[in-house]
Image (cartoon, grey):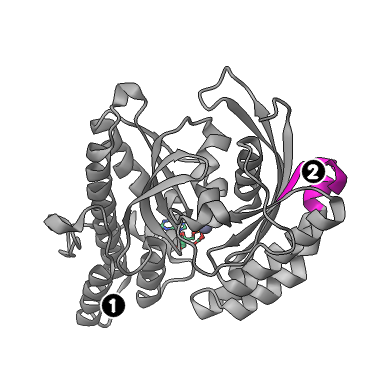
């Protein structure tokens, strides 16, 4: 489409972050992706303190917090960027999947801003935001494999272009971040559980307890994931150890994290082998989602990609967790690709919305 710059305001409210950002896309034939991405402003308000006492996100509280803060986050994003609403080439907001109350709040705000300013509107699939972030941060060209690991999602998919995603594997039960959060809760640790487990695991002995690696070696499992058996085994060990001490907790955390790493590595190895692209052709694995902040997992994924001669790309932690920049960027990519904007009056909010759904194109 246009060879000119595209500036987009993006809103994210699908879980427990209230976020707004402004990004700019500049066509640049000198780069692998053909684009340059700049984050002009990016403000994120985490609701961790609101949900921590409950050990997980409480949907009603999340929605109320989005209502309380979204106005201010949008004003802050515009002020920090030194922009006015009228300067935006498009407005983008998460339209799903996610907690429906929060999605409705951000989506309605995005539509209202688009109607008020006359800018085109894009209702973005939150997973697409995660999927395209590495093009904003690392200028990555299509195609690539994506491992999306967050509190609500755990999937491997192939990314061939804007709106062109193929699911390769998904979780059969818990998302991997959810597994970390539940494991932390049952070990008496705080929320979110991932960083708590990672910190304990650094001091623990991963070999003290033999924990299961669900689906590994099971021929018919493809690239799917499963974590509920691992969680049950952890609970069983914790019960046997009562009263549980600090060393036990650290050893269990280390064993749990190592088991998760083995599962992710095994599934990625299969997906890389099946990917019809060699390392020399630019074969690449991109990791996204909050769990990508885990250094131990990152190291393990680095080893498996290196062994296959693939590259590993992990956006910085602040852009792996939920943020408005990834939604603004997905909107900018859609506008740049010539995608028809969504109706600012009719685009639906969706609690469930698979990334590779055909409904995508008509959303
Ligand atoms: O992407 P995200 O911010 O939110 C969504 O779920 O969409 O991911 C949050 C998840 C939580 O489950 C949290 O425990 C996990 O990411 N997480 C981690 C780490 N940091 C955050 N899991 C493992 N290790 C970490 N260091
Ligand atoms: Zn997310």
Q: Is residue 93 visible?
A: yes
Cα–Cα span, label 1 and label 2:
56 Å
Q: Residue at x 68, y 49 (%)?
A: 341
Q: Which residue is mark 1?
A: 244
Residue closer to the observer: 141 or 240: 141
Is 211 magenta? The answer is no
Residue closer to the observer: 60 or 239: 60
Q: Tell me where residue 263 appears, x and y as whole percent.
A: 24, 54
Q: Which residue is mark 2?
A: 88
SS at mark 2 in the image: loop
- Where the C terminus falls, by quadrant? bottom right
* Mark closest to the chain's N terminus, 1 or 2: 2
SS at mark 1 in the image: loop
Q: Is residue 84 visible?
A: no
- Label 1–label 2 contact, CB within 8 A: no
Q: Residue at x 53, y 64 (%)?
A: 97
Q: Tell me where residue 271 appears, x and y as whole percent.
A: 27, 44
Residue closer to the observer: 339 or 210: 339
Residue 334 is tagged as none
Please state if 73 lies on the left or on the right of 50 as rendered.
Answer: right
Number of numbered discs visible in the structure rendering: 2
Nearer the viewer's eye, disc 1 or disc 2? 2
Which contiguous range is marked in magenta?
76-91
Please state if 149 lies on the left or on the right of 71 as rendered.
Answer: left
The picture quadrant where one finds residue 258 is bottom left
The picture quadrant where one finds residue 291 is bottom left
How crowded pointer 2 is (Cα within 10 Å; few <14, some 14-19, many 20+) is rated as many
Please state if 90 lies on the left or on the right of 357 as rendered.
Answer: right
């Amino acid at each position: 489409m246009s060879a000119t710059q595209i500036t987009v305001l993006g809103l994210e409210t699908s879980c427990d972050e209230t976020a707004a950002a402004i990004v700019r896309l500049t066509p640049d034939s000198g780069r692998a992706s053909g684009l340059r991405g700049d984050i002009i402003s990016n403000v994120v308000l985490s609701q961790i303190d609101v949900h921590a006492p409950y050990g997980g996100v409480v949907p009603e509280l999340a929605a109320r917090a989005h209502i309380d803060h979204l106005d201010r986050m949008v004003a802050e994003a515009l002020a920090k960027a030194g922009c006015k609403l009228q300067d935006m080439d498009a407005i983008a907001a998460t339209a799903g999947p996610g907690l429906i109350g929060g999605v409705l709040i951000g989506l309605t705000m995005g539509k209202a801003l688009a109607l008020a300013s006359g800018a085109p509107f894009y209702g973005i699939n939150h997973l697409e935001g995660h999927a395209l972030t590495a093009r904003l941060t690392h200028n990555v060209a299509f195609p690539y494999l994506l491992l999306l690991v967050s509190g609500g999602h755990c999937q491997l998919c192939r990314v061939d272009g804007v709106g062109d995603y193929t699911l390769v594997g998904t979780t059969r039960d818990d998302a991997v971040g959810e597994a970390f959060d539940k494991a932390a809760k049952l070990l008496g640790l705080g929320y979110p559980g991932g960083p708590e487990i990672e910190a304990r695991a650094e001091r623990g002995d991963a070999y003290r307890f033999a924990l299961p690696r669900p689906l590994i070696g099971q021929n018919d499992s493809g690239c799917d994931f499963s974590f509920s058996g691992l969680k049950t085994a952890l609970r069983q060990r914790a019960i046997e150890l009562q009263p549980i001490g600090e060393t036990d907790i650290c050893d269990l955390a280390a064993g749990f994290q190592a088991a998760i790493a083995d599962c992710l590595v095994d599934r990625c190895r299969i997906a890389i082998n099946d990917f019809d692209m060699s390392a020399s052709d630019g074969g690449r694995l991109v990791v996204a989602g909050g769990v990508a902040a885990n250094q131990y997992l990152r190291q393990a994924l680095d080893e498996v990609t290196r062994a296959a001669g693939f590259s590993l790309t992990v956006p910085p932690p602040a852009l792996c967790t939920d943020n408005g920049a990834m939604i603004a960027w997905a909107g900018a990519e859609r506008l740049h690709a010539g995608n028809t904007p969504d109706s600012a009056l009719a685009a639906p909010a969706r609690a469930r919305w698979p990334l590779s759904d055909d409904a995508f194109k008509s959303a």
